[in-house]
Every structure is written in structure tokens, then in C-alpha cells.
Image (tube, grey):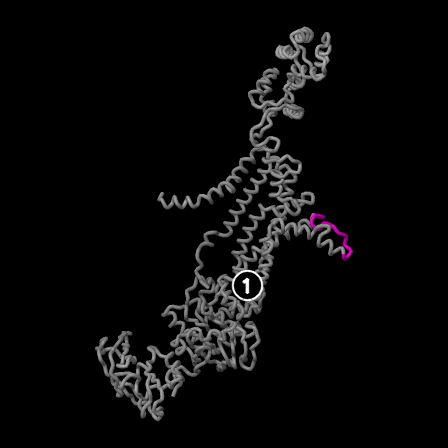
Amino acid sequence: MQRSSWLGLAFLSPALIVVLLFFLMPVILTGIFAFTNMSTATGVKGGSYVLNASSLRALTDAGLPDVTRSQIESAGYRVDERGLAALAEAHGQAVAEEFSKNHAGEVFTKRRDVERALKDLSSNPIRKTRDRKAAADLFKRSILNQRYETLDAFEAALNEAGIPKPDRPLITEIAYTGWTWTTANFDLLLSLDSTWQYAKNTGIYVTFTLAFNVVFGLFLAITTFYLPAAQATAFRAIWFLPRILPPVLYIVMWRWFTWDTGFISTVLSGFGVSSKNWMLDTEYHAWVTVILINGFVGASMGMIVFSSAIRAIPASMLYASEVDGASRWQQVWYIILPQLRWPILFITSYQTMSLLTSFEYIYLSTDGGPGGSTEVWALAAFHTALNNYGGNLQYGLGATYALLLVVIGVLASLFYLRLFNFKNLLTKPRIEG
Amino acid sequence: MRISITNFTKTFGDTTVIKDMSLEIESGEMLALLGPSGCGKSTTLFSICGIHRMNAGRLRFGDKDVTKRPPQERNVGVVFQNYALYPHMDVHANIAFPLKVRKEPRAEIDRKVLEIAALVHIEELLQRKPSQLSGGQQQRVALARALVRKPDILLLDEPLANLDAKLRLEMRSEIRRIQQQTGITAVLVTHDQVEAMSMCDRIALMNKGDIVQVCKPKEMYDNPASDFVAGFLGNPPIAFLDGIANDGEIRLANSEVALRLPSNVIDLSNGTQLRLGIRPEFFQPENDMKVTGKVSFVETQGREDLFDVTLTNGAVLRSIQSRGGDIKLGDEVTWGISREHILAFGPGGERL
């Protein structure tokens, strides 16, 4: 490679780093996370090993023999050498010896029983209840509700508890609190009714918003084309406002507009209509609001692209159609619209992509409500992975939603590229003017 | 159909392009609007077809006042300089467009399109897209589209400007043939005097928004109304000599040379500022009113040779002669001016 090429790369490197960090890495990580069961409970680093009541239930469901199960459950408190030595150290050799004589080798299921046995020693050497409880704990040998930080420690504990070797792998697997590799996310996702609801919502959202964007953008572009230049510019500037407004402010205004004490309610209350939240009172209103919010922003983009495309049509061609006798409608229908074919296709495909993945305006306005009726796929992925009401963020499942969206997006891009016949678009026109 | 423009004024913002112009175009006539670029000839054309609104004045087609009518209601066919074909329609659809927007029956449209395609010789191109046509073919399609609905008037805006020299020659006679065959009233906008003279019945010569002279091409050439007209028409161009009238002669500026004036201006009072126009074909060796000068430029044009002869006072005369002479650059020659063909102009450029 020549020196200048290195220099070029060096100049590019900030962009490359940004692309890598903020675009490529998230996609790769999404792909990785989608095949794990990561959640708040598992954390994203490693985990530890804990057997508790619920993991015991899971073990039973997974086919752990009852013998082994009761062995784990009833492991309780065992009066063994280790415990006696500890007792001797805490309360004196005499106490330990007496306790050994009475109970050596015995197994108690409950701490209470151990305490009672300690209390029954002659002269009741451990007076305080708290001390007795601590002394009882010296004999605790159950692996239930114990946290083992490493696999070795857990296996040692299993070994000590005398759990049969064949059952150990299953117990280890269920006791592990960290994340594991799994494809269960996909099965779960496909089996959930809500998944299909999200898909349906996304379909409604994309279709209607897209139609609004394109049709309204076209309408604005064509009407402003026929206006005098100064008026057209002012008009376009006004329609462009939603796009340059900060999204949060824009949505706050929509919320004021639709609140039960907001603009619509206030105005309509004058006509005897009881006030209500016009955004969230019904599914239908929620959809209308969501589509209008997104549509007004998207339409301005269509308007700009279509306007410049119309102005790129040679004036003589429009003159020609006028002297040929075409009315304004016919001019729009036969001359302008056919020549906007590529811009319309471009806006359609571009907006499909961005609408599929966009959820910020929905998140800020309805947040998927009422009752999940405007919860689109991308918002569901966000909610599942990063903003769960219950508090358990399911990174793995959320990533699975996102990954499917990436796949759909790539397929749609390929379809549109095919439709565009991209090479054709790049060739120079043979007729000028 | 007769076109009559009276007191037409057109302004763009603060710029007045055309002021108080009047022009009559006879029915069935082909008239050229000729002039240098920026003289307002295209503006006039676009005002006739209604693309530009007239700021003042009246426009009548026959007896009908169309001043306020939009272009759709004027029934004019226009051929634009870049043809303005619709790129997304094939040739058939392009030609059929004026009929289609009038919602004529399909069979009728097909019949008329085929008829007009035969007239302009493009029958075999009907299925092509404009991008698949050569310049000359696009020109024919544009003509067909302008003519297909039998307009009252055909307007041509520099129709030959985008063609190469050979095609230009061919389309020149084609357009004239089609115009004569259909008998349509036509207005041709051009800056090319040859086009104007060869294609049109009459020429309206424009300069700076005014019509300087309107008449038949030959008459305009022989009898120009001003030095501007004389200088605009003719290739190679006319040469001018400035001087002062003195006893039926002209004393050329900064020189002792005196020439007799043509008989129609012989009785000018002494001291009048004069400008003589001498066309190259009237400055020949055999003519009797001799002038001596040095050959300062020689151009071989094939059949003819063109010479510039610089007189002692620096004025230049042009001569065009049949080939065969043995004259070289720098030779001193004494050639004659045909006295009765001298065009005399006054100090303001007006013809005397």
C-alpha cells in the first residue's frame, strides 16, 4: 500500500471507530445476546451456584430422583467431627464431648431441634438463645440456600453431602445463577401470542405512517410547487418545523394537545363533550395519534425530496404539457408523478427501514399503550431488554426480538435494492432536458 | 390563422424586455422572429402561446381575443428548443398526449398519430422511448406532437439549434415542407439569419425588444431599414465606411479618399455624417469606382474566396470572389465598388 493510502485510512479512522463502536458492535452483540438467557437475574458476567426451593422444584420437574431430592432437603444439621471441633473451640471441650456422646452421627432437619438438643445438655452450658443458634449453625451441612462462588466449591459441597454422582450435572446446571447459551429465546418468542400482536402492530404502524408520509409529502410538494416562490418557501418551512423540533418537546406538545385537560378537551368541553385523554382513551385514538405524530415528521422529508425532484423537471416539459392542453390535474398525473417514480420509491423504501426500527415517538407518547395496543416490535425489544416494568430486564429475549428485526430489515433492503435495480439508477441519463 | 399583436409589453420584475410592440402575421404565413440573443424573440413566442402572460397589449388569433386565455385554450402547437419530449412515454404516447388530455376516443387517437407520423416520416419509431432517438428523430417527434391536434398556429423556438450542421440542413427543408403541406400559420424563433431567410415568408428582425423591420427576406437583404439590419443579414457580413458628405461625394474619415455617392442620396447637404454599407459581392475588381488597399485577410471557402481589404485610413472592406485569383495576404489591390449598390445610412443608423 502506498503512503497516501495509509494517510487516507488515518483520516478515516475516527469514522471507522465510531461505526465500529456504535453500529457494528451493537449488531454483533445483539447477535450474541440473542443466543443467551441473559437477564437482570443472571447478570452479564458469570454467576454463582445456589440451590433454593424454586431450583429444587425445577430439579423435580427435570426428573431428579426423589431419593436424591429428599437427601438434599433433609441434609439439615449433622453432628460430625468438624462440627464438634468447632463447638469445642467455641464453648469448651466438655460441652463438645457431652454433645458427641448423646448425638454423634445424628441428623436434624431443623435448627430448632439442634437448639433443643443443645439446651438439653446437662447444666445447659449455652445460656443465651443467640449463642445457641450460632452453635447450632456450626452443624449445618445442607447445601440448600447456600451460595457457592465457584464450580469447584459447589462440587465439593455436593461431594460432601454425598449426592450420587449421576445426579450432579443436572443439579449443577440448575443451581447455576449466571447466563448460559441457549436457543430457547426463539422458541419462546414464537410461542408467545404477544409476539404476533407486536408484528401486527408493526404492520399497522409502518403501513399507515408510510402511506401518510408519502401521500402527504407528495401533496405538500405538488401544492407548494404551484404556489408563488415566497409563499411556497414559507409553507415548506412551517411543515419542516416538526423535524427540527427536539422530539421530546414535540411529543410534550402532542400530550398537552391531547390530555384530558389539554387543548382538544378544553375546546370540546365548550361544546358539551366531556373531557378525556384523546391520545390514550381508545386503541383507535392511540393509533391515529401515533400515525399523525410520526407522519407529520416523515412527510416533511418526503416534501423536501419530492419538491426538489419536481423542480428538476425541465420547465419546458411543463410548458409543453400546458400548450398541449393538459390541465393542472393532467399535468400532475401524466407529467409530474411519472417522473417522481424514483423519488417515491426511494422515500418508500427508506421510510420503511427507518419506521421498522423507530420507536422513540411511540415510546414518548403512548409508550405502547393503551394495553399494549401500540406496542410495536422495536418498542417491545426495548421494553423487554432495557425498560421492563417488572424490573427483570431480559437482555437475551430482547436481543432476540432485535435480531429478528435486523433480519427483516436486511431482507427488505435486498428486496428494495432489487426493485430499484440499483445499477440502472447509477447510469447517466441519455436524454438531457 | 392570422395573428395580431398590438402594443405588447412584457416585463420580468423591473426589467422591461419588450415595450409596446405590434406585429401582424398573415394566415398561412411562416414568419421568422430573428435577432441576437436577449432581444426578446423567445419571450414574444412564449407570450403568443400563453406560457408568459402579457403585461399590456392585446393578442388576437383571427378574430378571437386570446390575451387572457391560458395556454390550454389557445390551440397552439409548440416545438421547444430542447424538444421537451416526455421521457417516460414512448413516441406514440408523446404524440398522442395532446389528444389524450382532450379525452378523444382511442381509435381516433391512433388514426391521427399514424397520420401525423407518416407526415413527418417516423412511422417506424412509434414504440421507442425518446432516449432511444437521435436528435433529428426527436425533432420530428416534437413536430408531430405539436401538429397532431391540428393547431391554429405552430410556434418553433430555435428548433434547429441542437442539431448538427448536416441535420440542420435537412430539417430546415423538412419543417418548411411540413408547414407548406399543412398550410399552418407558423412563427419561427431563431438567431440564425440563414434559417430565417431560407425557411420563412417574412422576417421580423428584433433588437433590444423592438421590431426593427418586418418584410420579405430578399427585400430585407436588399433594402435594410437601418445599419443594424444591414449588418445582421448577410454572410460574410456587410462592411461599413464612415465619412462626411461633400458635393455629392463622401470624404472618408481620416483620409483623402473621396467616393461618389449613389444617385438616391447625391443631394445631401455638405458636412452630413454618413455611413456607407458595402456588401462583399459589390466590391469586385471589375467595378469602376476604384479603391486601393492592402489585403489583410484571406479565407478560402471552397467555391469562393473571401478577402478583407484594409484601406489607408484603417477602414476594412470585404470582397467575395470566385476562386482562381492569385492574391496573397499583404498584396496591394485596387478594386471597384458598385456605386448603385451602396447602402447609405445616416448618423443615427437610419437608412437614407
Instruction: Decide which of B8, A338 is in the foreground and name it.
Output: B8
Label tally: 1
Main SS, magenta residues: loop
Quarter of the rendering occupied by the N terminus of chain A = top left
Bin the neighbour count of mark 1 within 10 Å (Cα to Cα): few under 14, some 14-19, many 20 and up: some
Task: Give yes or no for residue A274 being in the magenta stretch.
Answer: yes
Residue under the point 56% across and 55% down: A301
| Residue B312 visible somewhere in the drawing | yes
| Point 38% across, 45% down: residue | A5
Image coordinates for residue A226, horizontal then vertical, percent: 57, 65
Please report the bounds of the magenta region as a residue range.
A270-282
Please name whichever residue, A349 or B343, is drawn nearer the observer in this view of the structure: B343
Left or right: A71, with A419 as reference point: right
- Residue A239: image x %, image y %? 60, 58
Q: Residue furthest right?
A: A272
| Image position of A183 (left or right of B208) | right
Q: Nearer the viewer, residue A24 or B120?
A: A24
Q: Quadrant of residue B324?
A: bottom left
Instruction: Reply above or below: A39 against A309.
Output: above
Q: Amino acid at mark 1?
A: Tyr
Q: Is residue B304 visible?
A: no
Judged from the image, the secondary structure of the residue bearing numbered disc 1 is helix
- x and y, in percent, of residue B195 in the image: 40, 75
Q: Quadrant of residue B344?
A: bottom left
Q: Position of residue B137 (x, y in %)?
A: 43, 67
**Residue situated in front as seen by the camera: A42 or B251:** B251
Say if the magenta span includes residue A32: no
What is the chain letter for disc 1?
A
- Relative to A133, say whether B144 is above or below: below
The residue that disc 1 covers is: A334
Q: Examine the rendered structure and indicate whether residue B64 appears above or below residue A166.
A: below
